[in-house]
Image (spheres, rainbow, N blue to C red):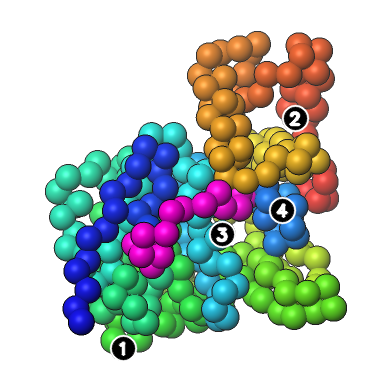
């Protein structure tokens, strides 16, 4: 029997319509935030800090994994919370997408979301819709998507091959590929970020830069601060010193939230709203270049400001 497709509307919280995830009317639940993912070991605070900075600059990100159930959707959902305040999230409707949003949305204040690039279900995007989507990136639209692949090279090989055949020029605007892995160990089922890569091109050849990598599912995530800083400068236009301060501040803040037991997307969203509101009030000489400020006691604020301003991301040897 043909199913009548009638997606639920987005609500004011920014939660996607249930049909977009394929839940068919199941109410959304309080999912995992970036802080939760650091707490459970999926990634570390340094990598989370970089992803926070990247999404604040509306980075185009593809979350990849070969395995089903590795946590692609969970990670992408957590990353979306880090987009600049006021960003319109548009959730593409797979085979049903007609791209009319191009005429109705403001490109520079919007972020396109694809639950999966795949031919497995009608709610996923495939075929000419994928080519149309990536063509929009050359016009300045930004994207977050998931795909079944392991690493940037597999992702781009899939997108360039039949039947998608996305031109290389349309792939250049992708900023990051984050790869997840999954494995069964004596500790149980582990889902981990195993690779973070920024995208560079030499002519028509993809030249991914590894920013963080995990040798095995149980290994710690090895990060490369110099690669983080180079990517921030090349892709987001941040001078190295500014990027270093921004990353140090975010890393420290994430570690503190983990220690304080901040749990769930609702709690994390409330914190972001609070800090973003404070940052616009010019309280106690906010940090230059920082978009999110905190308001501890004045003595603590002074001490932390001095620490941040003198930081060159010491925690990871930069």
Q: Give the spatial CA distance, label 4 vs label 2.
A: 21 Å
Q: Give the spatial CA distance, label 3 vs label 2.
A: 28 Å
In the rendered view, would you say 3 is above or below 137? below
Q: Earlier in the sequence, mark 4 or mark 2?
A: 4
For residue 38, the mark is: 4
Q: Is residue 96 left or right of residue 168?
A: left
Can residue 268 be seen here? The reply is: yes
Q: Nearer the viewer, residue 185 or 142?
A: 185
Residue at 55%, 49% in the rendered image:
30
Q: Nearer the viewer, mark 4 or mark 2?
A: 4
Q: Give the spatial CA distance, label 1 vs label 3.
A: 28 Å
Q: Give the spatial CA distance, label 4 vs label 3.
A: 11 Å
Q: Residue furthest bottom?
A: 162
Residue at 70%, 62% in the rendered image:
42
Q: Earlier in the sequence, mark 4 or mark 3?
A: 4
Q: Find disc 2 in the rendering and name its residue.
A: 308
Q: Pointer 3: residues within 10 angstroms few (<14), some, or many (20+)?
A: many
Q: Find disc 3 in the rendering and name its residue.
A: 75
Residue at 20%, 51% in the rendered image:
101
Q: Earlier in the sequence, mark 1 or mark 4?
A: 4
Determine contact: label 1, label 3, CB under 8 Å: no
Q: Find disc 1 in the rendering and name its residue.
A: 162
Question: What's the magenta region?
Answer: 19-34
Q: Quadrant of residue 114?
A: bottom left
Q: Earlier in the sequence, mark 3 or mark 2?
A: 3
């Amino acid at each position: 029997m043909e199913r009548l497709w009638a997606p639920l509307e987005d609500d004011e919280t920014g939660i996607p319509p249930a049909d977009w995830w394929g839940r068919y009317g199941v109410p959304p639940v309080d999912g995992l935030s970036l802080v939760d993912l650091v707490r459970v070991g999926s990634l570390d605070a340094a990598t989370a800090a970089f992803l926070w900075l990247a999404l604040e600059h509306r980075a185009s990100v593809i979350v990849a994994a070969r395995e089903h159930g590795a946590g692609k959707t969970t990670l992408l959902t957590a990353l979306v919370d880090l987009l600049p305040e006021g960003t319109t999230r548009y959730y593409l409707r797979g085979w049903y997408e007609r791209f009319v949003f191009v005429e109705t949305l403001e490109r520079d204040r919007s972020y396109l979301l694809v639950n999966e690039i795949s031919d497995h279900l009608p709610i996923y995007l495939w075929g000419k819709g994928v080519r149309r989507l990536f063509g929009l990136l050359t016009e300045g639209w930004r994207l977050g998507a998931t795909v079944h692949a392991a690493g940037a090279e597999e992702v781009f090989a899939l997108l360039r091959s039949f039947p998608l055949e996305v031109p290389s020029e349309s792939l250049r605007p992708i900023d990051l590929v984050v790869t997840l892995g999954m494995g069964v160990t004596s500790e149980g089922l582990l889902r981990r970020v195993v690779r973070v890569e920024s995208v560079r091109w030499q002519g028509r050849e993809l030249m991914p830069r590894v920013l963080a990598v995990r040798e095995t599912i149980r290994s710690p995530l090895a990060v490369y601060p110099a690669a983080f800083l180079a990517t921030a400068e090349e892709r987001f236009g941040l001078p190295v010193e500014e990027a270093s301060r921004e990353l140090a501040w975010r890393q420290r803040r994430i570690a503190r939230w983990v220690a304080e037991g901040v749990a769930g997307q609702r709690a994390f969203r409330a914190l972001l709203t609070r800090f973003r509101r404070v940052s616009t009030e010019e309280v106690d000489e906010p940090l230059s270049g920082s978009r999110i400020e905190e308001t501890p006691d004045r003595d603590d604020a002074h001490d932390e400001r001095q620490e941040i301003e003198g930081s060159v991301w010491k925690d990871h040897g930069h």
